[in-house]
Image: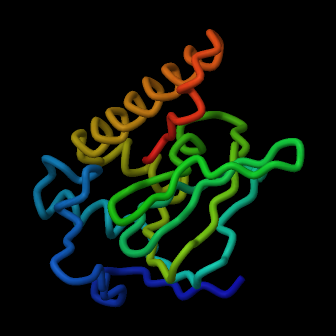
């Protein structure tokens, strides 16, 4: 898979689209420009074509992704069935469990649905940031989104467990 990569903000030309800015993304909420720049500088921006697979279910996970522009679907596959778990857009992030779990394998596929730009944070880079200069609010924002996702998954589980027919209508959206 051929991906264009950019190592610094001057090269990356984020090109987020009209009116979009990283400081509007939930993951950067409460961070100042210098703190956002610190996170952006720690990662690598990749331009990815529609239809590309970022990773497969079962792959070893060493990166997390923040969507700067475009759309990515998180898809699970089981017993010859595919289920879209989420369609993510600018400001959404995924793959973060790989950053915090030992020996983590991907729990679903990540498929690019339209030409996209993603910020890739590698596990070792994130660990260095955490040790030295990671904005604490950035980590709080990740934890907040993870807690929200856990709450939704718990609701879906309880509805399915107790045969609530509406459980089929519950959908994680990011």
The single residue placed furthest to the front in the displayed view is: 165
The location of residue 89, given as percent across then percent down, is 40, 64
The location of residue 157, given as percent across then percent down, is 59, 20
The structure's colour scheme is: rainbow
Asked if 91 appears above or below 21 in the picture, the reply is above
Instruction: Name the quarter where the N terminus is drawn.
Output: bottom right
Residue depicted at 73% across the width and 43% down the height: 105
Asked if 154 appears above or below 10 in the picture, the reply is above
- Left or right of 57? Residue 163 is left
Task: Tell me where residue 49 sits by quadrant.
Answer: bottom right
Task: Tell me where residue 97 sits by quadrant.
Answer: top right
The location of residue 2, given as percent across then percent down, is 67, 87
Residue depicted at 19% across the width and 57% down the height: 35
Residue depicted at 35% across the width and 80% down the height: 8
Residue depicted at 17% across the width and 62% down the height: 23
* Camera-nearest residue between 131 and 154: 154
Asked if 28 appears above or below 166 in the picture, the reply is below
Asked if 88 appears above or below 144 in the picture, the reply is below
């Amino acid at each position: 898979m051929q991906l264009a990569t950019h190592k610094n903000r001057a090269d990356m030309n984020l090109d987020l689209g009209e009116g979009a800015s990283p400081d509007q993304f939930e993951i950067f909420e409460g961070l100042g420009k210098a703190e956002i720049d610190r996170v952006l500088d720690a990662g690598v921006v990749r331009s990815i074509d529609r239809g590309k697979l970022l990773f497969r279910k079962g792959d070893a996970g060493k990166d997390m992704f923040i969507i700067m522009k475009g759309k990515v679907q998180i898809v699970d596959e089981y017993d010859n069935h595919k289920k879209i778990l989420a369609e993510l857009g600018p400001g959404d992030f995924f793959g973060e469990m790989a950053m915090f779990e030992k020996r983590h394998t991907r729990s679903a596929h990540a498929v690019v649905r339209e030409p996209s730009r993603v910020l890739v944070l590698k596990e070792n880079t994130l660990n260095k940031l955490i040790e030295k200069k990671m904005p604490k609010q950035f980590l709080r924002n990740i934890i907040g989104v993870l807690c929200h996702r856990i709450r939704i998954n718990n609701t879906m589980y309880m509805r399915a467990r107790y045969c609530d027919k509406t459980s089929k209508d519950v959908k994680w959206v990011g």
